[in-house]
Amino acid sequence: METKYIFVTGGVVSSLGKGIISASLACLLKARGYRVTIQKYDPYINIDPGTLNPYEHGECYVTTDGRETDLDLGHYERFTNVRTTKANNVTTGRIYQNVIDKERRGDYLGKTVQIIPHITDEIKRNIMLLGNTGEYDFVITEIGGVVGDIESLPFLEAVRQLRWDMGADSICVHLTYVPYLHAAKELKTKPTQHSVKRLQELGIQPDVLILRTEHDIPSGMRRKIAQFCNVAPDAVFQSIDLPTIYEVPVAMHHQHLDEVILTKLGVTPQGEPHMAPWMAFLEKMHKAEKPVRIGLVGKYVELQDAYKSINEALLQAATYCDRKLDLHYIHSEKIDDANADALLAGMDGVIIAPGFGQRGIEGKFSALKWCREHDVPTFGICLGMQCMVIEFARNVLGLTDANSTEMDPSTPNNVIDLMDEQKSISNMGGTMRLGAYDCRLKPGSLAAEAYGSTEVSERHRHRFEFNSDFRPRFENAGMQCVGENPQTHLVEVVEIPGKRWYLGTQYHPEYNSTVLSPNPLFLSFVKAAVKYSEDRH
Ligand code: GLN
């Protein structure tokens, strides 16, 4: 079958959940046996979100091939179980960089380089890259931003041209918002009409409309929207707020979104999507009543998107343990030795979050000291693992000035130090140790038991590492280095055997946890938390 392209655009406001809708559609198509991928185009000038503070766009997600990307790629993987790559996230910055590099090389042969055709051609080339591999039946392309933004104009122009070139092999799905005015007790369709008009002015006629709403939209109103927007009445869908994002594919399927889209792309829908494993997950989630209380210690806790993949990995693990995730955010700047007991005593398990820089770091040490001494299941991720090592050095090895050279470049007890390969780096963008690396686990370790294997591969995003000069002292005192890179011997996993569950990973297992394939370390951690809660009650 010829690769089919589905373009997803958004109108009215941002944050409507284009990523979730795209991921849900991909989930349904995948469940029908098709090969699907999703790519995201971000209109900002940054080359990638790696240099962005999480307060800007939330978590930075990392692909196995080492690209720092938008967090929507995390949703794509969690919903489809299909790995994303560099090609799945492209920003305006990268498009311009490619074009400017070509100009400097002389590729444009003396021509004036312009937004049309050069920038739009580069966008089109990128959009087609995944489809041209022949590996996919459907390529879903999400255009970030909102129709009407200056920044998204070149992307929409590229979509217009591609739709013209591809004809029936492509469609446009437009997501808009139908607000409810409490004072008037009315749903309002005007913003949707306006946003479709904006799209039409740009030469794009949407084939399918998805209306985000907090209230049920009556069928008469949907027909009215269809009529005003030149869209078939059966191609107007509503996406109403649901208790969890994982219900969206099911809600969209109940309205026949997948069938309508297949039919519009000239594919006859056959049978039903195989959603049984997904439904089993949802059923477990609905049935779970007993809570598992997890504390997440980090400095971005006011922002729910900052630790997106950790939240989702925990939710998946809790669901498979038949528990309801009760997640408590604990601000690392607000916890200290004096209040750690009050803040942590109710937790069945504690996660120490990844991060960068000094802010909130002392709070992480206080939390870890309390967790280690009270033998609470504790999971340190990346910076969280590095903090585990530092806290152990300070309070068990007696190296009171132990630190990471990220926080104190002159400490003599640099138990966490800059990686050799990082010492000559001056550019900050895209230069960390990024992407998936192999890790060999010690047989019999907690980590090896959790994975059921001694060879794993997980994703990284860091510049600092465990300083192996200190390894014998740690191991003699009880903190074992149970995972290392087979080539470089870089320490990837530490644990304290004999504790209930005390483990830190230099890598980010949360990037590799999906609805149908939850990450084994998260499962093992949540199981230990459940057991701890049962032992106490
Ligand atoms: N700041 C630490 C480093 O660069 C940890 C990074 C992280 O937590 N992702 O090594």
Image (cartoon, rainbow, N blue to C red):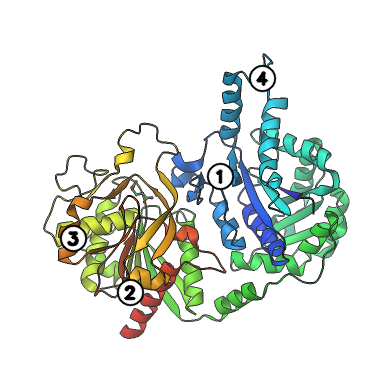
Q: In which quarter of the image is the C terminus?
A: bottom left
Q: Report helix, strand or loop for mark 2.
A: loop
Q: Position of residue 460 (x, y in %)?
A: 41, 51
Marks 4 and 3: CB-CB under 8 Å? no
Q: Report helix, strand or loop for mark 1.
A: helix
Q: Earlier in the sequence, mark 3 or mark 1?
A: 1
Q: Report helix, strand or loop for mark 4.
A: loop
Apparent side of residue 447 relative to residue 280 in the rendered image (left or right):
left
Q: Name the residue under label 2.
A: 346
Q: Mark 1 points at which residue?
A: 86
Give the number of the mark in front: 4 or 2: 4
The kind of residue tagged 1 is Lys
Tell me if residue 243 comes above or below residue 76 in the rendering: below
Q: Name the residue under label 4.
A: 108
Marks 2 and 3: CB-CB under 8 Å? no
Alpha carbon separation for disc pair 4 and 2? 64 Å
The kind of residue tagged 2 is Gly
Residue under the point 24% across and 47% down? 404
Give the number of the mark in front: 1 or 2: 1
Alpha carbon separation for disc pair 3 and 1? 38 Å
